[in-house]
Image (tube, rainbow, N blue to C red):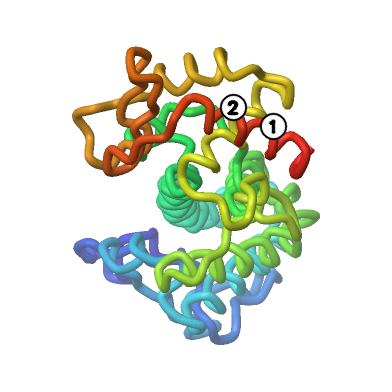
Amino acid sequence: MAPVPGQTRDGNTMSKEFFLGRGSGEYPSKDPDRRQDSDTPHRRVGYTLKGYTSNLFLSLFDQQEIFNSLDYYATSLDSDSTDYNFFSEVRLILVKNLNRLSKALQDFEVSEIAKLGMLDAGRAAFYEYRMSYQRKIVTDIQDRLMAIGRLSQLTGQVDIIKVLLLQAWVIDIQLKTNTLELLAEKGKKFSSSSGKGLDALGNILLNLMQQHGKDTGKKQILKLLEDMADTSSEQAVIREVDYENKLVYWSRFTPTAFDTIGNRLSKYKKKYF
């Protein structure tokens, strides 16, 4: 009998380790008469939970181990409960790592929204916005893995799952090295709605026009700016809407007159719509 995850062949528990797949060497024969532990000295590879959950894959070797495991289980019989249990262990760790990556991407999306000048980072977390193309890839893998209830379902999915996992690994690396450029969909920037060269106030105005319509009037825009104003937060873009002096204070309390706001709306309508 093959060792269970977390144990060596002699039954000793391996603290803080999962033993996944059947290693990168030759796999046991599919012939039930030949599938003996003594037949092939297949080696189970350990991953520490701390190290493994901080990366989608630790190395190319680890990636190959997982892919070899998936290929192996994709050819297993539905009646082989032992192989399904082993596959479930592989899936468990992959999903945990994908959950971590998805959360990191979501946090990055929020920060990118804040950079557009539309909302400060605190409020952006509660703003309804589109999911990035990269996070859709990660979510797609999670959905595919969790939908597998028997190994025969893995057979038709294994190739696309491996391709998506490679894409997710690249995304993970780019995110950690600050080289990731979010996309709204393949080939389109996540922040493509903002105008080039606009300051933080301009980005807010343009985004509000895109949300509420290009003909949104100055009075309504001022009310929307007032709703997002925050005098207590230094990170807030809109600080105050002063109706008495007809000024909008933004960023480091930079004043902009109401009439200037109206002129910007007219300019953006012609240029961006």
What separation in Å lies between label 2 and label 1 (alpha carbons)?
6 Å
The image shows a total of numbered marks equal to 2
Residue 99's spot in the image, x, y percent?
Answer: 45, 47
| 138 w.r.t. 110: above or below | below
Q: Secondary structure at mark 2?
A: helix
Which residue is under mark 1? 266
Q: Residues within 10 Å of mark 2 (few under 14, many from 20)?
A: some
The answer to whether residue 85 of the structure is visible from this angle is: no
Which amino acid type is shown beneath numbered disc 1? Ser
The residue lying toward the viewer, choosing from 178 and 166, is 178
Q: Secondary structure at mark 1?
A: helix
| 223 w.r.t. 186: above or below | above
Residue displayed at 53% across by 75% down:
63
Residue displayed at 45% across by 80% down:
59
Does residue 91 appear to the left or right of 232 in the view shown?
Answer: right
Does residue 166 appear to the left or right of 36 in the view shown?
Answer: right
The answer to whether residue 142 of the structure is visible from this angle is: yes
Which amino acid type is shown beneath numbered disc 2? Gly
Quadrant (top left, top right, bottom left, bottom right) of the C terminus: top right
